[in-house]
């Protein structure tokens, strides 16, 4: 076990990560009353959705009554800016965030070829996944319209860089 030496008057940590200062576990002689030897306790990290939250370490809780220095964490909701940073490069068409990576562009091209060669009707339904992996169902007609916009967007992005 590791221990923290803590001054409750100044609320300062003197030293951390040390073994207990006496071999028999007794309070060291001549130790001021406001100096406490606290057992270091680490709580389990909470479960959380990494897509919407982040893990933040809380301030260490120094409890001189329980004689513990407890390290803990909290799951905190990501800000909109943090959420936006986690979304891959994409273009939003008809409410769907289409991934614009080269891999996704190739996948959509193959899917368009399959839909065309399979002779699917405009009213048949297909499913596509957005840049976050969420599946969206739409008609072949809507898919073809989205893919024209998607292709134009990717073409212009490629030629503007």
Image (cartoon, rainbow, N blue to C red):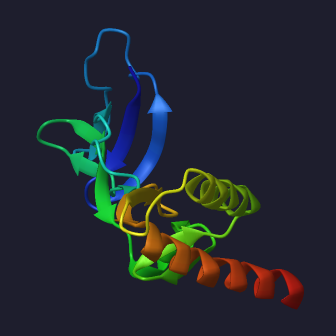
Q: Residue 128: in sight, yes or no?
A: yes
Query: With respect to residue 92, does 60 lie above or below?
Result: above
Q: Nearer the viewer, residue 50 or 144?
A: 144
Q: Nearer the viewer, residue 131 or 36?
A: 131
Work out which quarter of the rendered image holds the C terminus and state it.
Answer: bottom right
Query: With respect to residue 46, does 96 lie above or below?
Result: below
- Picture quadrant of residue 4: top left
| Left or right relative to 21: residue 46 | left
Q: Nearer the viewer, residue 69 or 151?
A: 151
Work out which quarter of the rendered image holds the N terminus and state it.
Answer: top left
Query: With respect to residue 106, does 5 lie above or below?
Result: above
Residue under the image location 72 percent in, 55 percent down: 103
Residue under the image location 42 percent in, 57 percent down: 126
Q: Nearer the viewer, residue 21 or 58?
A: 58
| Left or right relative to 161: residue 71 | left
Q: Percent from the top left, x then y, of residue 130?
A: 48, 63
Q: Percent from the top left, x then y, of residue 124?
A: 37, 60
Q: Percent from the top left, x then y, of residue 61?
A: 26, 51
Residue under the image location 54 percent in, 56 percent down: 119
Q: Residue 82: in sight, yes or no?
A: no
């Amino acid at each position: 076990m590791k221990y923290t030496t803590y001054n409750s008057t100044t609320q300062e940590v003197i030293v951390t990560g040390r073994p207990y200062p006496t071999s028999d576990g007794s309070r060291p002689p001549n130790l001021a009353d406001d100096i406490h030897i606290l057992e270091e306790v680490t709580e389990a990290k909470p479960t959380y959705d990494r897509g919407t939250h982040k893990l933040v370490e809380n301030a260490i809780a120094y409890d001189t009554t329980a004689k513990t220095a407890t390290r803990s964490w909290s799951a905190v909701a990501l800000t909109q800016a943090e959420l936006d940073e986690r979304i891959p490069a994409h273009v939003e068409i008809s409410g769907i965030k289409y991934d614009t990576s080269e891999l996704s562009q190739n996948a959509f091209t193959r899917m368009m070829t399959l839909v065309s060669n399979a002779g699917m009707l405009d009213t048949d339904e297909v499913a596509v996944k957005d840049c976050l992996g969420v599946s969206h169902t739409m008609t072949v007609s809507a898919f073809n319209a989205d893919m024209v916009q998607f292709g134009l967007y990717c073409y212009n992005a490629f030629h503007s860089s």
